[in-house]
Every structure is written in C-alpha cells, then in structure tokens.
Amino acid sequence: MVSLIRTLDAHTDKVWSVSVHPTLPLIATASTDKTACIYGLNEKFPLLSRLEDAHKRSVRSVAFKPPLTASADFLDLPAVACGSFDSTISVWGIDEPEDEEDEDVDDEYDDDENTGKRSQSDILCSPNNQWNLMAIIEGHENEVKSVAWNSHGNLLASCSRDKTVWIWETDPETLEEFECISVLNDHQHDIKHIVWHPTRNILASSSYDDTVRIYKEDDDEWSCVGVLNGHAGTVWCSAFDPTLASTSTIRLVSVSDDLTVKIWKSTVEEEESEEANPIRSSIRKDVEMDWELDVELPVVHTHPIYSVAWSKESGRIATVGSDGKLVVYKEKEDGSWIVQYERESCHGVFEINCVTWAQLNEKEVIITAGDDGKINVWEV
Amino acid sequence: MSALLSADDLNDFISPGLACIKPVESLPPAPGSEENDDGEIEIEIDTLGNATEVGKDGSKTTLSAAQISLADCLACSGCVTSAEEVLVAQHSHDQLLKAMSKNKGKKVFVASVSHQTRSSLAVAFNKTIEQVDKSLIDLFINQMGFSYVVGTSLGRKLSLLNESRNIMDLKKSGFKGPILSSICPGWVLYAEKTHPYILPRISTVKSAQQITGCLLKTLVSQDHDVSKSDVYHLSVMPCFDKKLESARKEENEDEPTVDVDCVLTAKELVTLIEESDGKYSLNFSDSNYSMADTYGLAAPRNWPFLDLTWSSDAGSTSGGYAFSYLENVKNALISEEGGNSTVSTFTVETISGRNSDITELRLIKDNSQVVATAAIVNGFRNIQNLVRKLKPEKAGANGSIKTTKVNPLVARRRARKEASKEGTPSSMDSSTSGMSVNGGGDSADASKCDYVEIMACPGGCINGGGQISAPSEVSAKEWISASVDAYHEIPIIEIQRDSSSLFEWTQKFCDQFGINQDRLLRTWFKEVEKPTDPNAILLGAKW
C-alpha cells in the first residue's frame, strides 16, 4: 500500500527538487518561485527557513552536503547547495548554535550515546538557526540543472544546459572557497541531472543526448570513463545502488523519456599500488570502466520518467514522472524486479518532478515534489 | 578554445554555444529576378538538403547557404569561440593551395613557423629540430614555391621585451593587481565575451604571430617593391585560435589586418602533405648547408637579427612570458643600481600551485626580498578560478550580501575550525582533509602576482589543439612530454641584456616605413555584448 501521510504546501509554484539530509531530520525543497525551503522531517514538518533573494530565476535543484563525521563530540553544521536557472549556484548554512546546547543537555542528561546524538540533531534542526547565504558560485553559461555533493562533502558537482559538468572543490567544513577543478564537456546536449556514488568519487550525469556518462579522477584529472548507451530518449535522472556502497560492484538505475527504467552494472578494481602497475602509459586505458545493461524494470509509466531514487534501507527503487504516477519496484532473490506498488495521480493532475526516500520515525517513507507546488510524503 | 576546434578529446576547454545566432543579412535579389509583390513564397528543401524558393507563379530559385565569416564570429557572442567550419573554410590547407594557384607569379608567398610546431613535427617524425627546420624550409621554398621562411622568434622577442616593459611601466604608474597576458587568442576572446570586467587588466602587447606578420609583410614588400597586399603570409601555429587572432581588426582600422593571410596548424600541414599525392613531402635527408646558412638563405634579404630568428627563449613552452618579465625586472634593477647588485644578487624561486598548470615565479633579491612575481596559468579550470578571484567585489543578487570574498558565516566557520583543531584535533575526520586547503601561505596565487601568463590549453601552447596527436599506442602525457623535450632542443638566445639594439631597430623600422609603433606592437580589446533578443538566445536551444 502507498498512502499519503502528509502534504506540505511548500511553494507557490512548481517544486523541482527535494533533498533529504543524510543524517539529520531535514529536507530541502527547490522551486520555480526562486526560493528553496528547509523543513524539519518529523510529524509536524515545521518550516525552518526559506532561502530567498539569492536567485533571479527558478531554483532547479537542491542538495544537502553530507556530514563530515558521525563523531558525537563534533557538531557538524549542515549546509545546502542550490542550482538555479539563473546559471549560478548558491550555498547556504547555519552558524554554530550557541545557547541551546546547554539547555538541551540539562533537560535530558544521559550517558546514553543516542541521547547525545539526538540532542545534537535537535540543536542543528532548531527553527532558531538562521540559514544564511555563504557563497554564490558563478561559472556556468546558462541554466544549472542539478547540483550534487560527493560523500566527503569536499567536491560539489553541477551540470547545465551549457552541456558541461563542473566539479568544484571546497573545504567541507568552512565551505570557504569553491575552486573549479574540472569542466567536463562530453555530452552533446543539455545535462539534466548529476549524482555521486554514495562512497566513491564516481560521478554520473544524465542528458538530453540520451546517454548517461560516468566520470572518475585519474592523476589529478577528471575524465569521462564510461558512456551508458541504450535509452531512446532523454535520460532525466539516475541513482547509484546505495546497498552496494561498500562493495566493488556498482549498479546505477536510469530513467528516461523512453518510459524505461534500466539498471546498469560495473565493477571497480581496488586501487593497485604503484609497483603492481609500473607502466604509467597503460594506466590511462585502465581507467575506462566497462558498463553493461544489467536488467530492465517492468514498464509502468506512460509518460516521461523524471526522477528515480534507490533506497538504502530496503533496496527498493521508486520512480515518478510526467504521468503523475509513483511506482515502487522491488528486487526478487533471482535478481528480477517486480512492481511492488503503483499509484496514480499522486499530485492530482500535475507532473511529479522529483522523488526521494527518507526515514520518518524510523519508518521508510517516500517524498515527492510536484508541479502543484506541493511536497507529498508517502508511507509504503 | 583550441581543443574545442580540434577533434581531440581533451576535456578542458570552453564549450561552444548551442547555435550560431548571428543574424544573416539578406542577400540582394539576383539580377533579372522579379520582385515578388505579394511576398508569398515557399521554401522547399529537397532530399539533398538544398533549399529552393518557390514563388507563387511556380518559379524556382535555388537559395545559397548563409555564409558566416570569421569576422562575424569575432563580433558575436553567440558562442564562446566560433564554429570549426568557419575556421576551416577561411584558413584551410585547401584555401592555401587555392591561393597559391590563383596567385602564382602574382604574389610573393612567405611563411613563418612557430617553435611549438617545429617541436610537434620533431616528435611526430622522430627527428631533431634542425632536421625539421631544414625539411620545412625545403618544403616551402623548393616544393611549394614560397620565397621566404622565417621562424617566429624575432617577433616573439619583440613581444617578450615589449610585454615586460609594458608591465614595468604599468606597475610604476601604480597599476593595482595582476596584468594578464594576451598572447593566447582563445583566452582573449573568452574574456571579451564573458568577463569584460577583466579586459582593463589584459596587456595590449601583440603576440609573436602578429608582430612577425607585420615585419615580414613590410620588409618583403619593400624588397620586392610590391604592395603589402601582394605578399601572402602563411603562419604555422600550434593552435586553431591563432586563426581567430589573425582576423582581429586593428584599432581605428575598419578592415581586418592582413598581416597574416592564412594560419595552418602542424596537424593541417601534415594533412596538406598527405593529400598532395606525393607532390609535397618532408625530406629529412641531410643537406650540406649549415643551419646558419639554411636559415640565412630562407630569410628575406633585408631581414634583421638572423641569428635570433629561429632561436628560443627561456621559461615556459608557451614562450616564457612570465620568466621574461622577471629577467627584465632583474636587468633593469641591475642597471639602475649600478655596481650595487649583480646577477648573483637575484634568484628565481618557483612555487607550484594546486595543479601542474599553476606555477608562480618570484624574483628574490639577496635571498630575502621579493621584488617581482609572475604566474603561469594554463587551462580553462584555472583561468576560471583566476577570473573569479579578480572579479570586482559586488553585492549579491539582491544587493544585500557580499558574495565574492569570504562571507561572515564562512569566516566564523573557519574560526571555529581553527579553534577545534587546536583543542581536539581528533575531531576532524582525517579522510576529508586529504584535499589541499590553502592553509600554508606559500602556495602559488596568480591573483596576487604582478603578471600572469595565461594560456587556454592545459600545459600551454606546446599542447595546442593544432599540434599533431599522439599515436594510439603512446599516452597523451608521454607525447606532450616528448614535445616539451623537443622544444627545449631549440637553442636559447637571451636578449634581455642587450635589448637596446632591438628597441633601436624597432624605432628605425617604424620611422623608415611610417608605421606607428602601436600598429606594430599593440592590439586592443572590446567587450562583445551579449545578445538581448531572447528568441536569438533560445534559437536551437535544446531543453
């Protein structure tokens, strides 16, 4: 069963993107109304901050920076990046909360580790925190379509209608400077979406040129190391399999205008030592990754599929698109995939632009963002 | 940038615009064709893609394809650099051969050859620089009927000397912040089209190609007693964008300069030879002439400084502009201070940057005092970071927040980080700090130097888009490194210490031919305005 548990009237115009913080109960949304919003991810879904006055056009994409470390005595301050049609990227964050910390500790003093964590999260997700603009990153020639942070938070990738992917390096703690370390222009057309591997520095971009491209760094240079050919229409989005994050197998799911959902597979060889590979000239060739189409999921959508999300908890895949449908796929033990749930008209007559998995009260939920300006939260 | 215009899959370049948006001017009606009063016509496109205009009376006229010239591209901001077809159409080996057959016996053909091209050919054919030089002179003069061939060194030395002098003059007059080189036409065009605020920082001293062109055309036209337009100058360069440079208009002149009639790259030269069916070849058989005789016989009779003409300069393989500035500052100081300082008073320190394409050079006096700084910045990503750093401070989108430099929130996070580092260093996840945060003050910072030598291609001009590509079995890196080695084979003649003879000769040359020094040595820049018609911007755009 898929049941709607909450609707947020998040924006006054289309919602393009929704991001869930990897560890804190926070979600961020991005809209044509030129703003992004930060909401608390709990029963009340409080609006914590509206990030406005930074962009002249739609905010197309939003992404939380992954936290630095899970250590209990270190308070990692959350940050979010927004990509806009005005060709810039904005980065937002909060100051270290001051007084609240003591109060919270007084309230429920406990040696329990979890409590320590919970209070940290309460402090960081408090509506008292002011979200402020930290940087505007310029460089793209026109509309930025997607932004994404790598797992360490020191690299931010962005892609644009200018057919390029840029990689920016920063200090993941201070977000001090965003130095462009690479401009990748392998795609033929508008690039719709980019995503990093959950643990490795491998980047995937989806494009109007019907391909997904994979990038890796080798010897200080980023380059395209794989092309996934097979879609017969714009590829709108892709997602890495987070359940395989720590193995050498990599799976990526991609969704397209051609109504198909495809899973691609590759393996990474663990870094070899210099001695094991003394011939430098051959290294460049080894960088190339072999990708093959692993499986195609049952076709359910009747219109272009705009977004796909792969659950870390349950390994399920959710897709949404122009037809207003939310589809949940489940992998069987034999490696085939079945349609677990399918739900029509999830945002009324409106298109759905983005889907993501989240945890609400230790239960898995799906969050969707639609052209109706609403964020819907679903129990599955 | 160059790489964009070549077929090579270099990934560090600026992408072209989505569609050429240059408005096409309507051609005058063909003679004899009647005016179509009601203006109703149809356009048919046949299976071959030919467009035919069909009038109401059924008459058909074949439409000619719209032509976009190189000058159009330079004036337009539609794409960052122009389309490859435009370059190929106007500066191709076919065009050269056409010009040669059309003007046989009418025009005097002359060629100038860049250092990087000679290096590329040396690596591609596994020959020495001297063998390459001899074979090129043989190709142009004996096989293709050219009258003269020179190296671009004299032009480059004039460019280097004037560049250094210009920087020193500007610095003396209180110019704040770095002065940027304009030797790379790809970078210049990019700045004109997308970062006009940077233009006042760009040095107006001309490149080796353009100075060489002016010298060659002037001297040859005098020697042969013909007009300059009857001298056809072929320039052989490492870079496709040099074609764009040759089409730039002089300041206060309406027509594009014709100091260079055709620019070919090393790659295109090889194609020309390959497609000639054995008519042309590079002969590497040893001739009896010494190098000095070979160079001397190939040069125009009134060509000065023969020994300099094929020589090289110290510093980077893009011409050593950064290094030359420091050398000139050093020599100026030595002569100013009389006996108080000598060459040994100074050292040049090299500081590397966050990647191999950023280097800072510092001229240090008495092992303590930094007296001049210059940086070498290559490749689009590094240019990006530099121009963003040099962008004037301005308010955010809403006039409220300063965005370009450190913002208060960032500053507080940094303070917090520094405090936490002192207190509990273990609280930082060490795996995330593997990246180079500019913690140490001694990392190269081009934005704080006196002068920056900027080239759009990663690795600089030796890796230009027009250089011969590596065969499939050789890695690109090894290939470039071999080209660098070949480049360093070219003997260096340092001219800084007796530069006065070059300045004097330049003065005499300009006086003799009534050429303004600025015409010979200076170029200019102009902001290319962004298109304002939204339809033009959207034309051909794919969403």
Image (tube, rainbow, N blue to C red):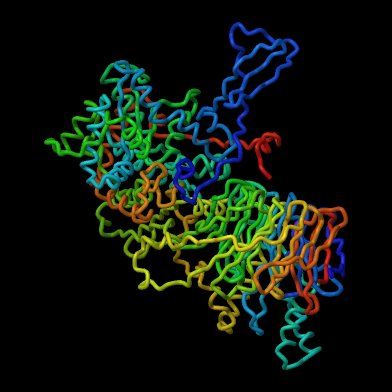
Q: Is residue B539 left or right of residue A168?
A: right
Give the residue at the far top of this rendering.
B32
Q: From the top left corner, tell me how far across and down residue B152 is, in percent.
A: 31, 37
The quadrant of the image that shows the C terminus of chain A is bottom right
Mark yes or no: residue A161 visible: yes
Give the residue at the far left of this rendering.
B288
Q: Is residue A321 left or right of residue A72?
A: right
Q: From the top left corner, tell me how far across and down residue B53 is, in percent.
A: 65, 18
Please give the name of the residue rendered at 20% of the width and 34% of the height, measured from the top-left corner: B295
Q: Is residue B204 left or right of residue B18?
A: left
Please give the name of the residue rendered at 62% of the width and 78% of the height, measured from the top-left corner: A69
Residue B535 versus residue B414 in the image, above or below: above
Q: From the top left corner, tell me how far across and down residue B7 is, in percent.
A: 45, 43
Residue A123 versus residue B161 in the image, above or below: below
Q: Is residue A109 left or right of residue A312?
A: right
Q: From the top left corner, tell me how far across and down residue A362 is, in percent.
A: 78, 79
Residue B191 versus residue B437 in the image, above or below: above
The quadrant of the image that shows the N terminus of chain A is bottom right
Q: Could you say which quadrant of the image residue A99 lies in?
A: bottom right
The front one of B491 and B48 is B48
Give the residue at the far bottom of this rendering.
A111
Q: Could you say which quadrant of the image residue A200 lies in?
A: bottom right
The front one of A138 and B8 is B8
Q: Could you say which quadrant of the image residue B284 lies in?
A: top left
How many circles with numbers are drawn on the protein?
A: 0
Mark yes or no: residue B187 visible: no
